[in-house]
Image (cartoon, rainbow, N blue to C red):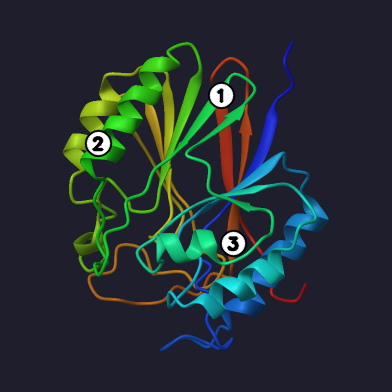
Amino acid sequence: MNAPIDFIQITDLHIAEPPRPLPASTMNTEDSLWLVLRTIERDEAPAFMLCTGDLANEPVPEAYARLHEMIGNDGCPIHCLPGNHDDPGMARDAGQSRLRWDATVEAGNWLIVMLDSHVPGRIDGRLSDAELKRLEQTLARHPDRHALVCLHHHPVPMESRWLDNHILKNADAFFAVIDRHPQVRGIVWGHVHQAWAGRRNGVELIGTPSTCFQFLPRADDFAFDSLPPAYRRFRLHADGNFTSEPIFCELTL
């Protein structure tokens, strides 16, 4: 019997250069990332990690270089995709560490597909025709492997007026691909700075809170929540089932 596979998702790091609290926030995003990384090191033993976008707050080389220094080369690989705050090319070329930019991640009889929903100059997201084609072809090549699909932007509404202005704009085309491939077990995203869970046509839908500040759920206008930095823990089972839970970190660690 195959042992379950444990991995961690982090998202929306918003590393700033120089390190500082971002506007309207009192939280230094470098300090909050250190807190999350130390918590993971203390409490978890993941096979790998995923980082689902917004690695930097401003896409400048110095912010990505600082992140590479923080992450280092020790520990499990961290597979990344870009968010709306990122420059994908700059992020990939910024330096050497355990950050990886693989289009897919293989884990036992699971396949994790990493999608790029970044649109230059925009906060909302869109999957290009090339990304949709790659998703279709990847799933078609692996009909017998359970699949998780990851992207930055939320493909379903969060019931938050301001945040849903910044949704994945071609979600219908995305779900048309998903619906053709019954091996997809879950869709995972960042961007929303809050824990969210739903279900569509038997597929689990999962939004994950940020390693820094959280947004107030179901708010009409931009507002912060009081919850601390967080990450999400996953366990994949060989039969296609999986579990996940958001883990909020103690600010006094």
Compared with 81, 227 (above or below) is below
Please report whichever mark, 2 or 3, sits nearer to the chain's N-terminal start. Answer: 2
The answer to which image quadrant residue 58 occupies is bottom left
Amino acid of disc 2 = Phe
Q: Tell me, yes or no, if residue 147 can be seen here.
A: yes
Badge 2, how many Cα within 10 Å: few under 14, some, many 20+?
many
Res. 110 mark: 1
Which of the image's four quarters has the N terminus? top right
Residue at 17% x, 37% y is: 172
Residue at numbered disc 2: 174
Q: Secondary structure at mark 3?
A: strand
Task: Please tell me which residue lies in front, 242 or 29.
Answer: 29
Residue 186 at x, y percent in the picture = 43, 32
Disc 1 from disc 3: Cα separation: 25 Å
Q: Secondary structure at mark 2?
A: helix
Q: Residue at x 57, y 66 (%)?
A: 211
Label 2 to label 3, Cα distance in Å? 27 Å
Q: Nearer the viewer, mark 2 or mark 3?
A: 2
- Pointers 1 and 3 in contact (C-beta within 8 Å): no
Residue 188's x, y, as percent? 44, 43
Which of the two marks, 1 or 3, is nearer to us in this view? Answer: 1
Query: Circle 1 sits in a helix, a strand or a loop, which is it?
Result: strand
The amino acid marked with disc number 3 is Ala
Disc 2 from disc 1: Cα separation: 20 Å
N-terminal label among 2 and 1 = 1
Q: Which mark is residue 140?
A: none
First of labels 1, 3 by sequence position: 1
Point out residue 177 in the picture as x, y percentages from the top left corner.
Answer: 26, 27
> On the image, numbered disc 3 is attached to which residue?
230
| Mark 1 residue type | Trp
